Amino acid sequence: RSSGQEIITVIVLAYELCNKIYDSAGGSHRLRERGWTTESMGHACITGLLAARLFGLDEKQMANALAIAGCFSLQPGIMLSPGGARNMRTPFGAYGGILSALLASKGFTGGLEVFEGRQGLAQAVAGGEMDLEKLKQPRKDWTILSTWVKTFACDGDMQGLLEATVTLVKRHDTAPEDVAEVKIKTNSYNYRLADPVKRRHPNNKYTADHSLYYTTAGPVVDRAVGPEQFSEQKLWDPRVRELLDKVVVEPDPSLEEFSSPGIAEITTKNGEMYRCEIHHPKGHPLNP
């Protein structure tokens, strides 16, 4: 029964407050490096706080809603392993936040030092490396204006790589049967995720859309990466399966400063080599 204006306000606040948490932890990538999903410290805590606001709770109840949600929000990185559970991480965070606000409205309380207290989120999740002052500092710009929209139906960190690959095959009208090798270069984070032993030959949708090998081979055949590229029929397309072993992934130090960069180099069987480099893929705040 909230007003439209209040709903819009809460959405804007959600972006601001979640990103304050990531800023204070040194960036969302730092949380992932420590073995947690990005959502662990942000979504449930902030949903609890904002749900409490929408329910009309007072300041003390709002604080307790955040505290309760924070204590039950931790999501280890194993959740991102292949399988449908990873797609539930944000809904479960929202569920936990709303439940926490309802509990707070009934008088339940939580550890109000959920961030800074002994064995709180700053210590347990961020390893003690959390700048709590940044939680109180206003950000330079409204975060919601820097929303990143993915162009391709797969992991956000692959967007630059896929744009580079799709650009090349369209520009040079490259047929999959003419390809000798597709070399993909990315930053060290994406390179570590590539793992050719586990990810080169995916056997279902959940492993395919996080496989640099599959998501590179697919657009060489179809010139697109949409939901249909992860169908059961396409997954076992012999043209795609043949290309999987022609994909090479390498780290490139020149790409370290970018969040979703990619260099694609396609070498054809007659010796021609085509190259495309993308720093900010379409949909990135710097390339809206």
Image: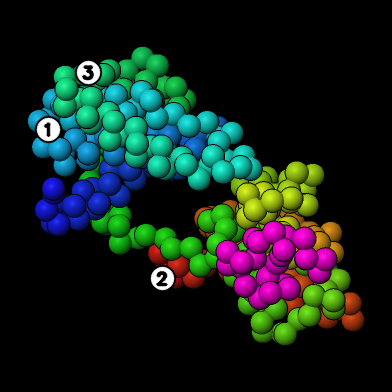
Q: In the rendered structure, are the residues bearing label 1 and label 3 in contact, judged by CB atoms less than 8 Å apart?
A: no
**Residue 193 on image: x %, y %:** 66, 46
Magenta run includes residue 31:
no
Circle nearer the N terminus (1, 2): 1
Give residue 117's position: percent from left, percent from top: 32, 17
Q: Which residues are magenta?
A: 218-239
Secondary structure, magenta segment, majority class: helix
The one nearer the camera, 218 or 266, is: 218
* Residue picked out by circle 1: 57
- Which residue of the protein is positioned furthest toward the right in this rendering? 270
Q: Is residue 235 above or below residue 62?
A: below
Residue type at mark 2: give it.
Answer: Pro
Give amino acid for label 3: Thr
Q: Quadrant of the C terminus?
A: bottom left
| Residue sitting nearer the eye, 222 or 180 | 222
For the point 90% across and 81% down, the residue is 270
Comparing marks 2 and 3, which lies closer to the viewer?
A: 3
11 vs 4, nearest the viewer: 4
**Residue 109: assigned label:** 3
**Mark 2 or mark 3: whose residue is earlier in sequence:** 3
Q: Kindly report the distance in space between the C-alpha atoms of the residues bearing marks 1 and 3.
A: 13 Å
**Residue visible at 11% across and 37% down?**
56
Pinpoint residue 99: horizontal percent, then vertical percent: 28, 31
* Image location of residue 132, percent across then percent down: 31, 31
Q: Earlier in the sequence, mark 1 or mark 3?
A: 1
Residue at 49%, 38% in the rendered image: 37
* Contact? badges 2 and 3 (CB < 8 Å): no
Residue picked out by circle 2: 288
Q: Amino acid at mark 1?
A: Leu
